[in-house]
Image (cartoon, helix red, strand yellow):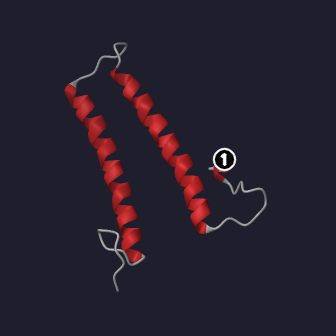
Amino acid sequence: MANEENVTGGKEESKAERFKRLAELRVGNAVKKIGIIGNLAGANYEFTAEQVEKILGTLKTAVDEVEKKFQKGLNRKGYNDQGKFHL
């Protein structure tokens, strides 16, 4: 991911700053790509309900996996499911 390098003008970037910068970039890219997938629903294409179910199922599985990773990260940092700190 060459375009995701530290682009803070030479100053040291904190983990929070790097997270925010990369999250904005990556989520934006993902949303654009999902929109492009949505273009396949247009009249220029022919598809079956089974194909649509496979596409949507695959996307939902990917989102579920991302959610699990974030939840695991929150749990490691001492947050429960409601985002409240616990010891």
Position of residue 80 relative to residue 87, above or below, is above
Residue at 68% from the left image edge and 65% from the top image edge: 13
Judging by the rendered image, the residue that carries numbered circle 1 is 3
Residue 10 appears in which quarter of the rendering? bottom right
Q: In screen coordinates, is 6 left or right of 33?
A: right
Q: Position of residue 81 (x, y in %)?
A: 29, 69
Q: Is residue 77 above or below residue 16?
A: below
Q: Position of residue 15 (x, y in %)?
A: 59, 67
Q: Compared to 52, does 24 lie above or below?
A: below
Q: Position of residue 18 (x, y in %)?
A: 61, 61
The one of 8 and 72 positioned closer to us in this rendering = 8
Name, please, the residue furthest toward the right. 10
Which quarter of the image is occupied by the C terminus?
bottom left
- Indicate the secondary structure of the residue bearing disc 1: helix
Please tell me which residue is depicted at 35% across the width and 57% down the height of the picture: 67
The kind of residue on which mark 1 rests is: Asn
User: Residue at point 33% right, 42% down?
Assistant: 59
Q: Residue furthest bottom?
A: 87
Q: Residue at x 56, y 47 (%)?
A: 25
Left or right: 25 as drawn, with respect to 85: right
